[in-house]
Amino acid sequence: MANRAPLKITVIGTGYLGATHAAAMAELGFEVLGLDISPEKIAMLERGETPMYEPGLEELLRRHVAGFPDSSGRLRFTTSYEEVGEFGDVHFICVNTPQKHGEYGCDMSYVDSAFESLARHLHRPALVVGKSTVPVGSAERLATALAELAPVGEDAELAWNPEFLREGFAVEDTLHPDRIVVGVRSEKAERLLREVYATPLAEGSPFVVTDFPTAELVKTSANSFLATKISFINAMAEVCEAADGDVVKLAEAIGYDDRIGKKFLRAGIGFGGGCLPKDIRAFMARAGELGASQALTFLREVDSINMRRRAQMVELAREAVGGTLLGTRIGVLGATFKPDSDDVRDSPALNVAGQLHLQGAQVTVYDPKGMENARAVFPTLRYAPSALEAVRGADAVLHLTEWREFQQLDPAALGEVVAVRRVLDGRNTLDPALWRKENWTFRALGRPTA
Ligand SMILES: NC(=O)c1ccc[n+]([C@@H]2O[C@H](COP(=O)([O-])OP(=O)(O)OC[C@H]3O[C@@H](n4cnc5c(N)ncnc54)[C@H](O)[C@@H]3O)[C@@H](O)[C@H]2O)c1
Ligand SMILES: O=c1ccn([C@@H]2O[C@H](COP(=O)(O)OP(=O)(O)O[C@H]3O[C@H](CO)[C@@H](O)[C@H](O)[C@H]3O)[C@@H](O)[C@H]2O)c(=O)[nH]1
């Protein structure tokens, strides 16, 4: 192996996952070719621009895309499957697997299409590695399709290597993963993946080798656990609201038990994004197909609790402004599903803003990075260039995404421009004492009124 040329890697689908994976693979020392069906995305990446906001990603790209000072030149992009097939020893599939329209199941059409396009161009031995989040059983099916479609036949092998990165920390998580999980069917596939991940493995990342179904299930069960933890604390928030308790104190107190842990116990308007909501729904749908739906009925409740929190936020706003939203002015801080991302897919913040608008409020939104995406999915809302402008003249201010910028806002300065000093914290990261000191009425989900 020592004399062999370094592996050449391709990454199919250069969205949130793929663009990061491609840049990280170049950082690890490999020659990398990224492919997407979107020529616009590829043109941006070739210019060293990221199609999305992800901290540190643009810098990483520019360290490796040719044309930048001192760049390694190891990272290139294309829209040609032919070029990818000729180039790669290891091909990572990172295309999207959204929720199907109008049902819970996973839309596998992008994965199927990417596999088919790639397979037809595999004229030399290759390892195809699925990274997209898919329903259990997909890898088995795709392995058969791959062997049938690839001109190289059985020399095109499949492995499944789910990804656990978090948006906002994608670069860090990819370069230093807390575990690497690989579903493989041969020693050769395992050896190749150990070679790909040699650097994180040398740094101590655990390497879990398993079969296809287990690898697929690790991913969906991890996301289900995370979603369950959030809905657990949000269920406690509902009880706190009924009993006048404080869910923030409660979370702190139970979190000291390290069997429970402090992480993922932030109560608020709940989880969103391109992963947790659709992944738990696809998991339930798949379990149903497998005759195991009963095992996952709790996830239906996890989903319901989550969606109720958004409705409760709207209700709290309606109550706060005196019973009707019609004609009121609401300043909304945050549009993305979480801070340090521009992603508004299934964003609780945008969803709440949208519901307020539909109930007749005049809603003005500000988000540090998500304005463009928010405007594209919800053009009828108003958008302001700063937090101060978003809350100007507002009857209530809603804090819906916990950007650090919002925690540093000066309640006195904001108080000068609003119509009424009334703030509702949907993320439980504002300091109530600070706002109340400046004579704001402060309300939050799961916390006492005063
Ligand atoms: N975003 C995350 O944080 C994250 C983390 C772990 C796993 N995942 C999983 O990774 C997958 C990708 O998620 P994402 O958020 O990066 O999605 P995304 O929508 O940002 O990116 C997907 C990309 O694939 C491209 N694409 C679609 N069909 C293609 C085809 N046939 N050939 C080539 N390119 C094609 C799209 O143009 C797009 O650029 C999903 O399965 C998701 O569940 C995402
Ligand atoms: O205590 C918490 C923690 C998170 N959230 C919300 O939960 C959502 C998801 O957050 P997070 O999991 O950090 O974001 P993602 O980037 O979507 O990452 C999840 O989904 C990815 C895609 O599958 C996985 O790779 C990651 O491991 C998994 O954390 C966001 O809306 C957060 O605001 C809360 O409401 N309370």
Image (spheres, grey):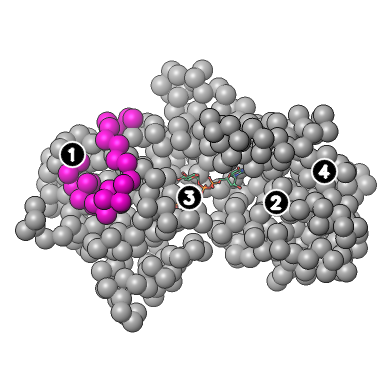
Q: Residues within 10 Å of mark 1 (few under 14, many from 20)?
A: some
Q: Which amino acid lies under the numbered mark 1 shown in the image of this protein?
A: Glu
Tag of residue 363: none
Q: Is mark 3 within 8 Å of ligand 2?
A: yes
Q: Position of residue 15 (x, y in %)?
A: 43, 57
Q: Which amino acid lies under the numbered mark 2 shown in the image of this protein?
A: Thr
The Cα atoms of the two marked residues, 4 and 2, are separated by 17 Å
403 relative to 271, above or below: below
Residue at 8% x, 56% y: name it: 2
The Cα atoms of the two marked residues, 4 and 3, are separated by 30 Å
Q: Secondary structure at mark 3?
A: loop
Query: Which residue matches tag 3?
Result: 166
Query: Which residue matches tag 2?
Result: 429
**What stretch of residues is rendered in magenta?**
190-214
Q: Nearer the viewer, mark 1 or mark 4?
A: 4
Q: Which amino acid lies under the numbered mark 3 shown in the image of this protein?
A: Arg
Q: Position of residue 34 (x, y in %)?
A: 31, 61
* Residue 201 is inside the magenta segment: yes
323 relative to 144, above or below: below
Q: Which one is earlier in the sequence, the residue at label 4 or at label 2?
A: 4
Q: Quadrant of residue 394?
A: bottom right
Q: Secondary structure at mark 1?
A: helix
Residue that extends furthest to the right in the rendered view of this protein: 322
Q: Are marks 4 and 2 in contact (CB under 8 Å)?
A: no
Query: Which residue matches tag 4?
Result: 316
Q: Position of residue 442 (x, y in %)?
A: 84, 50
